[in-house]
């Protein structure tokens, strides 16, 4: 009996082993190497080959729908797609546009706006209203396989340029007059994710009977903007002002529109003023999009322990600025916050009551506020700049104003301002950052508000800064210079070699130099440094012009360093052949 049971168990194990071997063989036969199959190219359906299309600037947000048939695959793996646009001689390795197809890459179509196509044409070198032949393609991706199919397409750009990266305002009607180098920057409104909207805005004063224009830059090749039949367009005709006042100016390049809203007043409203949320305390306009006032904050609503306020224009609850959640002092207009992607705003909290100086800044440097206790102690007798706690510069005093030119700032170090050189007095800080700018130029400058607070200065970049602090207006300004090494034998055809600031009042450039050419160190046209001697590879510099330096006897690549004295009156240079 036991023998029969053992025999049956043995045969059962033989059967199971036999079935397992068959299953393994079948599985192995179904597993082919990943490379042993093909993925065909997608068949492009629309637009057809050599399709021609003129982009309409009045319908910037309209789209062209590119469609294709799913490619044939020997395997039933998922296929995803990328839509590509490239130059006609490109290979799609660095396309002008690369986007996923519909439904996160799985649908055989892509919708591309006219504006995206116009920007790609500009990147490809097409001028305003110019036709250019490009090619569009579909990159099909399935596991390790990729295939690309493409068709030529002829596209014609808008008859106006793509939105500029920066925008400025100047003219006889503005606060800065007709001098382009003084033009005020507009703020390119940002979405919550940090992307730009191409809608520019500024709060500034305009004078009736005068004109203004917008500019995409303050130097070089400038595009000037005007209004033509209520449409924003490139042009030289000045935009007239019919009523003097402070305005919110909004320039929207997507709709080609200009909107002006007159601002009679900005006020604070909240439970820290008389009348609480039914009250209104107006601020004073100081110019350049800044409103300010010293105001006693009180307990305007005894029953509410959460002391706070907001900014309101013209007594209109539809014109309210609140703080962006998570920011220190950034503001946005409540009525447009949702469209910009901000999930929530908050009132401005007040930790304690008393006399405070409140400042509202709405200009090209951003939209923010400051609130600081208004000390009655007045302007200090002295003012010092401390580096990592050590005094490095004493400001020169002239009435209510302190100044210093120039001080070498290293962004890796901590800088504070104090009325005592041993840092035992009152501290002051600045509400912005030194070196923060939207555009580099020969002379870069910025302004902001002075705050009595023990806090390190914000430093955007290393530079030799000139700083001016005005205690009367509680403001500050700074500037620095970008130097160039002019190299020429024909002044009109000169080579302007941009130098890099490397710290300690030193600038340098490495470039090719020619025999018989003259050289000078210049920042057009505030400073010009020439040599004491004209033919030496190293020597002294004079800030009064000096002589042209003609010191290259062997053409080649040289590293050139220039070091200036703190007052920029003199310096030294050295040419080193590489």
Image (cartoon, helix red, strand yellow):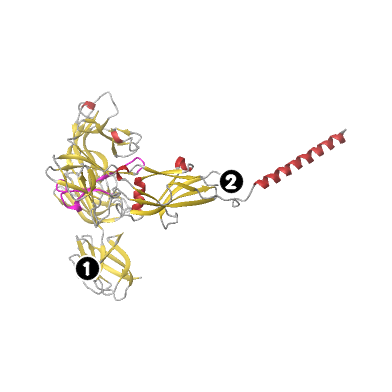
Image location of residue 505, percent across then percent down: 27, 60
Magenta stretch in the rendered image: 165-194
Asked if residue 263 is positioned above or below residue 546 in the image, the reply reads above
The number of numbered discs placed on residues in the rendered structure image is 2
Give the labeled residue for mark 1.
491
How packed mark 2 is, by other alpha carbons closer than 10 Å (few <14, some 14-19, many 20 or more), is few
Give the labeled residue for mark 2.
75
Q: Nearer the viewer, residue 36 or 462?
A: 36
Q: Secondary structure at mark 2?
A: loop
Q: Nearer the viewer, residue 390 or 201?
A: 201
The picture quadrant where one finds residue 317 is top left
Q: Residue at x 13, y 43 (%)?
A: 207
Could one spot residue 270 in this view of the protein? yes
How packed mark 1 is, by other alpha carbons closer than 10 Å (few <14, some 14-19, many 20 or more), is few
Q: Residue at x 29, y 43 (%)?
A: 58
Instruction: Please identify the residue farthest to the top as the structure is shown.
Output: 303
Give the quadrant of the C terminus: bottom left
2 or 1: tag closer to the N-terminus: 2
């Amino acid at each position: 009996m036991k023998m029969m049971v053992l025999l049956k168990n043995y045969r059962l194990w033989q059967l199971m082993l036999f079935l397992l071997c068959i299953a393994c063989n079948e599985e192995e036969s179904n597993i082919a190497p990943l490379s042993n199959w093909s993925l065909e190219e997608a068949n492009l359906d629309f637009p057809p080959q050599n399709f021609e299309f003129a982009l309409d600037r009045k319908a910037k947000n309209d789209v062209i729908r590119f469609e294709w048939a799913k490619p044939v695959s020997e395997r039933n793996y998922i296929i995803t797609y990328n839509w590509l646009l490239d130059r006609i001689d490109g290979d799609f390795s660095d396309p002008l546009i690369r986007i996923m197809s519909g439904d996160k890459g799985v649908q055989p179509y892509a919708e591309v706006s006219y504006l995206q196509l116009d920007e790609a044409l500009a990147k490809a070198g097409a001028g305003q209203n110019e036709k250019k032949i490009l090619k569009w393609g579909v990159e099909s991706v399935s596991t390790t396989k990729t295939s690309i199919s493409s068709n030529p397409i002829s596209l014609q750009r808008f008859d106006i340029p793509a939105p500029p990266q920066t925008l400025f305002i100047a003219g006889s009607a503005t606060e800065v007059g007709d001098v382009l180098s003084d033009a005020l920057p507009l703020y390119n409104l940002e979405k919550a994710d940090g992307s730009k909207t191409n809608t520019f805005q500024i709060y500034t004063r305009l004078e009736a009977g005068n004109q203004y224009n917008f500019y995409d830059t303050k130097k070089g090749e400038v595009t000037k903007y005007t209004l033509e039949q209520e449409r924003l367009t490139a042009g030289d005709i000045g935009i007239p002002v019919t009523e003097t006042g402070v305005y919110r100016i909004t320039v929207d390049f997507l709709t080609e529109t200009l909107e002006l809203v007159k601002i009679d007043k900005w006020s604070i409203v909240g439970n820290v003023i008389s009348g609480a949320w039914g009250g209104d305390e107006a601020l004073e306009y100081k110019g350049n999009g800044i409103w300010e006032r010293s105001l006693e904050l009180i307990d305007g609503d005894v029953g509410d322990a959460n002391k706070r306020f907001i900014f309101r224009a013209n007594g209109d609850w539809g014109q309210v600025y609140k703080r962006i959640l998570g920011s220190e002092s950034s503001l946005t207009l409540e009525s447009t916050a949702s469209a910009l992607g901000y999930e929530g705003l908050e009132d401005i909290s007040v930790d304690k009551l008393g006399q405070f100086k409140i400042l509202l800044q709405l200009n090209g440097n951003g939209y923010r506020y400051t609130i600081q206790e208004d000390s009655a102690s007045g302007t200090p007798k002295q003012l010092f700049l401390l580096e990592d706690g050590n005094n490095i510069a004493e400001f020169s005093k002239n009435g209510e104003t302190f100044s210093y030119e120039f001080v070498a700032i290293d962004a890796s170090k901590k800088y504070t301002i104090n009325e005592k050189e041993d840092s035992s007095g009152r501290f002051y800080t600045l509400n912005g950052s030194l070196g923060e700018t939207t555009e580099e130029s020969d002379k870069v400058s910025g302004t902001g508000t002075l705050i009595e607070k023990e806090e390190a200065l914000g430093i955007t970049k290393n530079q030799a800064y000139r700083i001016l602090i005005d205690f009367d207006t509680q403001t500050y300004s700074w500037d620095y210079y970008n130097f160039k090494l002019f190299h020429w034998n024909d002044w009109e055809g000169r080579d302007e070699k941009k130098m890099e600031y490397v710290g300690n009042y030193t600038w340098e450039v490495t470039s090719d130099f020619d025999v018989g050419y003259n050289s000078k160190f210049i920042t057009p046209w505030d400073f010009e440094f020439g040599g004491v001697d004209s033919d030496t590879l190293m020597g002294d510099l004079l800030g009064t012009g000096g002589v042209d330096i003609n010191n290259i006897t062997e053409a080649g690549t040289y590293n050139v360093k220039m070091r200036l004295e703190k007052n920029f009156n003199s310096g030294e240079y050295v040419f080193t052949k590489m």
